[in-house]
Image (cartoon, rainbow, N blue to C red):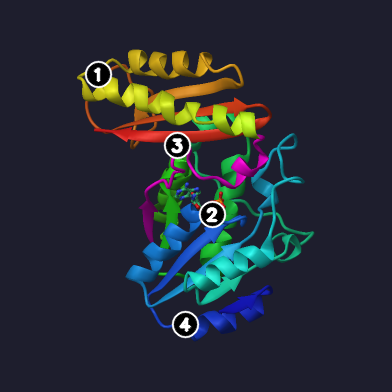
Amino acid sequence: MKIVTTLPELRSARRILPEPVGFVPTMGTLHAGHISLVQAARAECASVAASIFVNPTQFGPTEDLARYPRDLPRDLALLEAAGVDLVWTPTPEVMYPSDFQTWVEVEGLTRPLEGELRPGHFRGVTTVVAKLFNAVGPDKAYFGQKDAQQAAVIRRMTKDLDFPIEIVVCPTLREADGLAMSSRNTYLNPDERQAATVLFRALSAAKSAYDSGERDAEKLRALVRDTVNAEPLARLQYVSCADDDTLEELTQVTGKALLSMAVYVGKTRLIDNFVMG
Ligand code: AMP
């Protein structure tokens, strides 16, 4: 496995990779969810490239950039064991030199949900992913359903900017008790870790109502709300039942719907979602 930091190093390593190339962008502190993306890439592509970069521009001023967990030696060992061929670990200076002044912004899809609560977040995400795509030039890029709006926004950007890259969205990997795997789960103390199962429990409650025929979106949102409100360590930030393509809130679920939520467990912000229909 080749590990590179600078752009010239990346370009010469990329040039000799057998094609098609699959690409897995990450912020490190890897877990089985990230590795499942690598495995999907490994199964479909002749070579696999990954990046590890905690992208400062997608964090708000009061968010957890400074304390975001980092463990590069462990991450590199996991990527090597998973069969990655090339890892790019750019520094903030490589990605954002001091005179940097160009941004990539997707409009409509970034307005609701995460975009509304985290102003500037998606501008940071799309800018860094566009730069990663330009530098790596993959044939396919792999993202997790866990960050459903991010996947939708990247799909849009890829289409709108004519990147010749296929976006592949892989299922959310969960712990045995249903908690979606996330690097931010490392912030949780034992009581909070227990309470964090409330996201899965709330989504499951709404999903079983849906499976029993409930199609009133507000009733599905209310089930999520009630479940989270019953958990003392959790505070619901939003629950949404939206059209899976447009992310517009629904009154009635007729086609594919994205049921998504953000919850604070203590000081840790967690997100999760189910797709229905
Ligand atoms: P991150 O390092 O959190 O930026 O995540 C990198 C990629 O891994 C993104 O495409 C995420 O959606 C994906 N990912 C994160 N958690 C999971 C999970 N539990 N299951 C599947 N993919 C995930």
* Pointer 1 with pointer 3, Cβ within 8 A: no
**Label 3 sits on residue:** 177
In the image, farthest residue toward the left: 213
Query: Is 177 a magenta residue?
Result: yes
Q: What residue is shown with label 4? A: 17
Is label 2 within 8 A of ligand 1 (CB to nearest ligand atom)?
Answer: yes
The amino acid sitting under disc 4 is Leu
Q: Nearer the viewer, residue 159 or 4?
A: 4
Amino acid marked by disc 2:
His
**Mark 2 residue element:** loop
Q: Which residue is mark 1?
A: 215
Please tell me whether mark 2 or mark 1 is closer to you in this view.
Answer: 2
Mark 4 surroundings: few (<14), some (14-19) or many (≥20) residues within 10 A: some
Sequence-wise first label, 1 or 4: 4
The one nearer the camera, 224 or 176, is 176
Residue 74: x and y in percent read: 64, 64
Helix, strand or loop for disc 4: loop
Q: Percent from the top left, x then y, of residue 147?
A: 47, 43
Q: Amino acid at mark 3?
A: Asp
Q: Mark 2 = which residue?
A: 31
